[in-house]
Amino acid sequence: MSSRGARISAKGLGFTYLGDRSPALSDVSFEAEVGTETWITGPNAAGKSTLLAVLAGVIPTVVEGKLQGTIEVGSPLEGSAPVPAMVMQDAGIYLFRTVFDEIAFPLENRGVSTEDLETAVRAALAVVGIAGLEGRLLHTLSGGERQKVAVAAALAVDPDLLLLDEPFEQLDPASVDEVLTLATGCAADGATVLIATREADHVPDGARRIHLVAGVRTEDEAQAAPAYVHVARPMGDAVLEMRSVTHRFGTGGGVDEVDLVVHAGESVALLGPNGAGKTTLMRHAIGLLRPDAGSVRVLGEDIGPRRVWELARHVGLLFQNPDDQVFNRVVDVEVAWSLIAQGMSRTAAIERARAVMVELGIEGLAQENPHEITASQRQLVAFASVLVADPRVIVLDEPTKALDATAAETVAAAVDRRLDEGAGVLLVTHDLRFAARLADRCVVLADGSAIADGPAGELLADEDLLRRARLLTRARPAESRS
Amino acid sequence: MSTDTAGGLPAFEPGAFPHPVGLLALPVGPRMFLTCCGVLAVALSASISVLVVQLAALLMVAIALRILTPLLKTWRTVGWVSASIVVIYAWAYPGSTDYVWVFGVQGFLSGLLIVVRLLGFVTVLYLMLLSTGPLAIVRWVGDVNDDLGIMVSLTLSVVPVMKQQMETTIQAQQARGLEMGGNLVRKLRAYLAVMIPVVVKSLVRAYGMAALLHVRGYGSGRRDKPVFRVTAAVVTCYALGVLWVAASTVARLALR
Amino acid sequence: MNKRIALVFVPVGIGINIVGGMLASGLKLPVFLDTIGTILSAAILGPWWGALTGGLTNIIMSLQNPMDMWFALVNIAVGLIVGYVSIRFGFQKWIVVLVAGLIVAVVAPIIGTVIATYVYGGLTGGGIDVFTAGLMKSGADVFTAAFIPRIGSNLVDKLLSVFLVMFVILALPKNLKGFAAGPEKA
């Protein structure tokens, strides 16, 4: 792959989204030369995606807002403009039905003729290792396959400027390595590559780095992993029991004879890579899925005859994406909603809601429109709406995806309090650090089967196991866990 | 945009149509013109016999293209309404003077005319659809106008995603205690509880797609323009269309 | 709201029409609610994009059921009416939405009945034909006989639809509301 590269110079760059009160980026300055690879790191909502969007030209052409400072993206060759390509954060957003059309589109827009199209598409897919997928429909692909399609679409046009936004989210570690090798290869050929990620583990030692926190460029402080001492809580009866649960999907995948038990006062982390069956298993806890074989009991009762909304009184499920649930006009009604839906009077429900909001520190948001607050705050609102019904079983689905570090700690503290009161918690995640913070016990799921079940301290220190379960990338030493 | 790759044409959701039949490699544009002429000609026809003649001709074309059976199957889509029309017009038409039992002859004939014309419309349109296939038509729309083509393609890709999102939202809300049933008021509340997240997520997705369109180079103006070649088949097609409309007009005036 | 955004909003609007209709029949509601997307599109983007959403919905449905294309005119009219109302008054006040809903509830069946009378003789093959037949028998002309039953179902469906859209718009963040926010803020 030959590229000419792009020279970037940003001075005092700032951007505020239309309708937002605070800027997403403030006074950011940096330079990038041709043939370099720069990593942009920082927690959630730091402004990484915003910065990439400015470099790609999406801001201000497509997204409206106030842009300040100067940004120059130039080509080393006089009189030509660098060709940008970007792999966006959410590979679930795509344009066409078939993989072929998705890859053909950027090629056509760069002038590739119709006769050459087929070869070019096939070549692009082969580069990323998904040759043969061109006839497939995008909405039937797995998350990892879709992200590879997005990478293929970006690399196909031979970009001068390659922007990758959170490439690690959907891919298993082997694919991550492949993609990073390709990106480094692009840089070696002269392209300018920028990679944004919130997982600082992946940044190679000595790499060029821009660290953003709340839109401002700062020096990265290596944070010592806080040591938590797990409280030995008295465990009560089983609040959630899954025995030999089997559920197979027609299209393949599912879970096979999995045992999972959560006791009162206990928190269990369900670990595993994408596609292992964590979500499938989790859905059984509230009756959204029913097992083909095996049994599920909540508070000692078989859930067979119970409807989902009846189980909702005892099982509180926090979905990964708060936007799947949030729909009211003001936050306090949103938090109170499940109580109102179950028949409580509006005033009483809102009072209970306020109490939970105070506990989580979000009472100031009570009159806000849930869609006008940050994604992390919205997830806290969703969490409040789950806690308000006082469920005995709390299930958290990938909570750290949307939450920033402070909010994640707020959630963990609230969960600790509920555990003290005798609730049982099932934490579904592939974030090992959060699991270390909260879990008493871990169950590791891979390809639909439970391959390990034991105390958190032991399992999280077992690198071999974690690598077998594809939860670790590269040969990185696990950080010290309590 | 998508070509016949190993594995054949992807199924068009919902439902799948048979593969387009090679009609002397006639492009979609002239077919569209011919279809419009056909619809116009049928619309201008005011007598049952003229319509029957056109129907017979269309059925013969279908036989030649070997799609007679699928075509006749599509007549079933207007089966009930056709029966309805004939019976109700015969019974209730206000202009009838001669009666057979409760059914008026003029009403019956009036209803029959409507039915035959309806079948005419159905036949012209389905003949076009079955012989061309929806994917070729979508491609043609894109050739005619880039923006229209993009909008149609985006719609086809966004609908299955929105269906999935609707299902996820139904599950998420049920997990909070929402009952997907009950009296009318509860059902309407349930409707809002599902539609609002679906709408919001779709609008957010729209922004993501707009950004994708930009970063993938849409609007940079370097697309390969399709070449419209004029062949004998194309000219015949246009001529046929014009003749068809003319014949229908003449028939209408002559039989007045 | 620039053109690029409108270009992607229209497909989403069409999707909402389709999914909205599916949800209504899934909940077994006695109305279609299949123009929600057109109304939303028109309220946010204005009459032309709203009309395009409506028309394109029928065209895309025609790829499977070609006879759907006839009623494109009805949905185009819905888009135009709601769009013009939204540009002048926004789409968040009860009275504005009510008036828009009433206008649509009358205009839509007028256009629809004209089309249905010509193509289908005013009939549908469904239960509503009983009313049409009865009215014809008692001396009404075909158009009137077909119109009266339709205006009943349209009133319910369209009024419900515009108010549902109003609630959706009220729940949206400011930057997504477009014209629907009202003339001062657009």
Image (tube, rainbow, N blue to C red):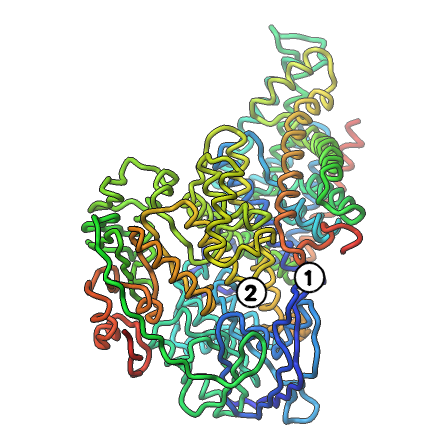
Q: Secondary structure at mark 2?
A: loop
Q: Is B51 in front, or is B163?
A: B163
- Pinpoint the chain carrying mark 1: B
The residue pinned by badge 2 equals B1
Q: Amino acid at mark 2?
A: Met
Q: How far across and how far down the image is residue B51, in percent? A: 66, 32
User: On screen, A374 above or below A195?
Assistant: above
Q: Quadrant of the C terminus of chain C?
A: bottom right
Q: How far across and how far down the image is residue A182, in percent? A: 43, 84
- Pinpoint the chain carrying mark 2: B
Question: Which mark is drawn over residue B108?
Answer: none
The residue pinned by badge 1 equals B145
Q: Quadrant of the N terminus of chain C?
A: bottom right
User: Which residue shows up at 65% across the image and 49% down it?
Assistant: C56
Q: Amino acid at mark 1?
A: Asn
User: On screen, C32 above or below B169?
Assistant: above
